[in-house]
Image (cartoon, rainbow, N blue to C red):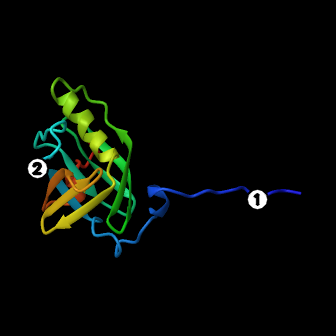
Amino acid sequence: MRSAPLLIVAGFGASLHPVSAGDNVLIGTAWQLEAPSNASVQAERRETLAFPQPDRAAGRTACNGFVAEARVSGERLSIRIVSTTQMACTPPRDVHEARYLEALSAAQRFAVEGDTLRIYVRGEEPVLRFSRLRESPADAHGRDGK
C-alpha cells in the first residue's frame, strides 16, 4: 500500500502565494532606495527595486543588478534573490550591496503610501524606504539586467 506524502504547512511563508496583477499593487512599479532607517544599510542613490510581473522582482545594488522571486499576500512580502551580476564592487559599496540584499531577503511586509514604498523586516520599524520611479520597471534595473 502506498502512503500519501505528508505535507506540513506552517509559519509566515505558508500564506504567500502567486497573485494576479489585479491583486498586487506592486506589479508594474519601480522604486529607488531613499532612506534606510537601519544604519547597517546605507543608500548609494543607485539602489532600485522593481516588480515587472507577478512573482518577480529585479533591481540594482550599488554595483550589480539582481533578479528575485517576490511573493505577496495582502501586505506580506517575501523576496528571494535568485541571481546577481558579478561586477567587482569596491569598499564601501561591497558592504552596502551585501546589506541591501540581506535586507530585501529579510522582508516580511510592505506598505505603499502615495509615492513611497516601505519594506519592513520585523515589527513596525521600516527598514527600507523607496520613492516611486516614473520610468518603466525594465529601466529601473537596466535593459540588459545589470
Instruction: Give 11 or 138, whichever is nearer the viewer.
Output: 11
Q: Residue 137: x percent and y percent? A: 23, 58
Snapshot quadrant of residue 45: top left
Q: Residue 62: x percent and y percent? A: 18, 37
Q: Which residue is mark 1?
A: 4
Q: Residue 65: x percent and y percent? A: 27, 41
Q: Mark 1 falls on what kind of element?
A: loop
Q: Residue at x 11, y 48 (%)?
A: 35
Q: Which residue is mark 2?
A: 34
**Mark 2 burial class by Cα count in 10 Å: few <14, some 14-19, many 20+:** many
* Disc number lying in front (1 or 2): 1
**Mark 1 burial class by Cα count in 10 Å: few <14, some 14-19, many 20+:** few
- Vertical relation: 96 (above or below) 126: above
| Disc 1 and disc 2 in contact, CB within 8 angstroms | no
Snapshot quadrant of residue 9: bottom right
Instruction: Give 80 or 88, whichever is nearer the viewer.
Output: 80
The answer for how far apart the CA atoms under marks 1 and 2 are is: 49 Å
Please indicate whether residue 42 sits to the left or right of residue 10 in the image.
Answer: left
Q: Residue at x 21, y 29 (%)?
A: 95
Q: Quadrant of the C terminus?
A: top left
Q: As drawn, which residue projects farthest toward the bottom?
A: 22
Q: Residue at x 30, y 60 (%)?
A: 52
Which amino acid type corresponds to the residue marked 2 in the rendered image? Glu
Dot 1 or dot 2: first in sequence order is: 1
Q: Residue 16: x percent and y percent? A: 44, 62
Which amino acid type corresponds to the residue marked 1 in the rendered image? Ala
